[in-house]
Amino acid sequence: MESAELIAMLRGVREQVRARHPQTSGPGNLPLPALLPLVHARDAALGKVASIGVVNPRRGGPLNALVQAVKRLVSRVLDWHVREQVVFNRGVMDCIDAAIEAMNESNRALVELAGRLESFGEQVRQQSEERRQEAEELKDMRRHWAEWRAGWEIKLHETEANYLRNVGELHAAFQHRVTLMDANFRETVRGQHAGFTAAWREGMEKTRREFEHLIHSELRLIRQRAQLGEAPGGAWRSAVPDPTSASSSPNGSPAIDHAAFAERFRGSEEYVKTGQQVYVPYFAGRANVLDIGCGRGEFLELMRDAGVSARGIDLSAESVALCCLKGLSAEAADLFSYLAALPAAQLGGIFCGQVVEHLPPERLPEMIRLAARSLEPGGIIAIETPNPECLAIFATHFYLDPTHTRPIPPRLLIFYLEEFGVGEIELKKLAPAVESMPALAALPGEFREAFFGGLDYAVIGRKR
């Protein structure tokens, strides 16, 4: 075995022996009776008891053998005599062993008791120390209380005096604050009155500017008609089938001043051109573009600025004359007759803005068929019309124009285009309703987009 293991085993045996037979003083220097001399005496007595009846050995030889035989004979003869003594001796040894064991148990009990007493004494000492510390703290608290009480009475008088002085200062400050608030209130009222006066003047100025703009628009229309040699009350017509008479609209309603109507309800020319900028990329680089229902010529002006050759048709001679006055190519014509007379695959692009809603529903497929026939392969067609999927148009926009016949759902218009060979169709929703009706912003986003999206929509496709 390794030396370290042997040493560990010896230490373990030593600890067990010491625990079994404690021979030193216990915890707290408790004196224990020494049992080692008694153990030695017992061991010596056991040696003597074991030698009773044993013949001492002697050296060899006939005489010694005879002596040994005699001794054994005598031992056997006296065996009955010493048997009781041997039993007694062994009983005494057993009694001594039991006494030693009892003393060992007593020593162990004393050691354990001493350990417990020492632990209890340690607890008692700790408790005593805690009680002593508490007593010291209580004594210190009583001393500090006596000192604090004297200082507290002094501070009480000082605090009372300070309180009364602060109350007086707060009262004075309150009076001063009331005076300032009154002055501020008067100043605020004066400021609000000045703001109201300024806002009123600004509103009046804005109203004056609006009236001046309206008067300017009316005068401009009058001057344009004067340049065209027409009376100020002449009627304007869209690119719809021939009217029943010159004094009525296509659906038989009384004639109105459509130039003034377009200025007020559709918007100024600048506003319409800004909205139609979205179509410029689609027609860029094209040639021979036709604007069906060119009106005041906003789209034709955009095409001219983009370097695209374009011409327009319209039933209104006044609108055609206005376009010609701007240097645009336009002529008065019915769209059905004009498209039917064109050779097939003649046009590079067709734009039709705010026209198809004026047509009778049964003639819309014919118009799309003629337009698709006139387009060259790859030609672009863009049709803009009010969006019936936006409920707001029925409350504020669609029925403002008495020449409107029926709104056209986007899917129906897309179906017609696909039927007559137009593909790569793109749907664009224009003029979000929330811009002209801010109250719609309070609706949930998905609901607003589904039922109050764009007031108008455009379908843009390419001839296959």
Image (spheres, rainbow, N blue to C red):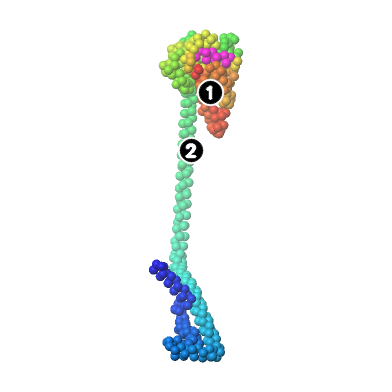
Q: Is residue 266 above or below residue 188?
A: above
Q: Single out the mark in the foreground, 2 or 1.
A: 1
What residue is rendered at 53% in x and 10% in y? 340
Q: Position of residue 438 (x, y in %)?
A: 53, 30
Q: Which residue is mark 2?
A: 189
The residue closer to the viewer here, 316 or 313, is 313
Q: Is residue 72 visible?
A: yes
Q: Is residue 401 above or below residue 443?
A: above
Q: Secondary structure at mark 2?
A: helix
Whether the magenta-drawn stretch holds residue 277 is answered as: no
x and y, in percent, of residue 74 in the image: 51, 91
Horizontal and vertical percent for residue 374?
51, 12
Prevalent SS, magenta region: helix
The three-letter code of the residue at mark 2 reads Val
- What residue range appears in magenta? 363-375
* Residue 260 shows in this picture: no
Residue furthest left in the image = 3
Q: Residues within 10 Å of mark 2 (few under 14, many from 20)?
A: few
Residue highlighted by disc 1: 456
Write the residue at 45% across / 18% down: 283
> Helix, strand or loop at disc 1?
strand
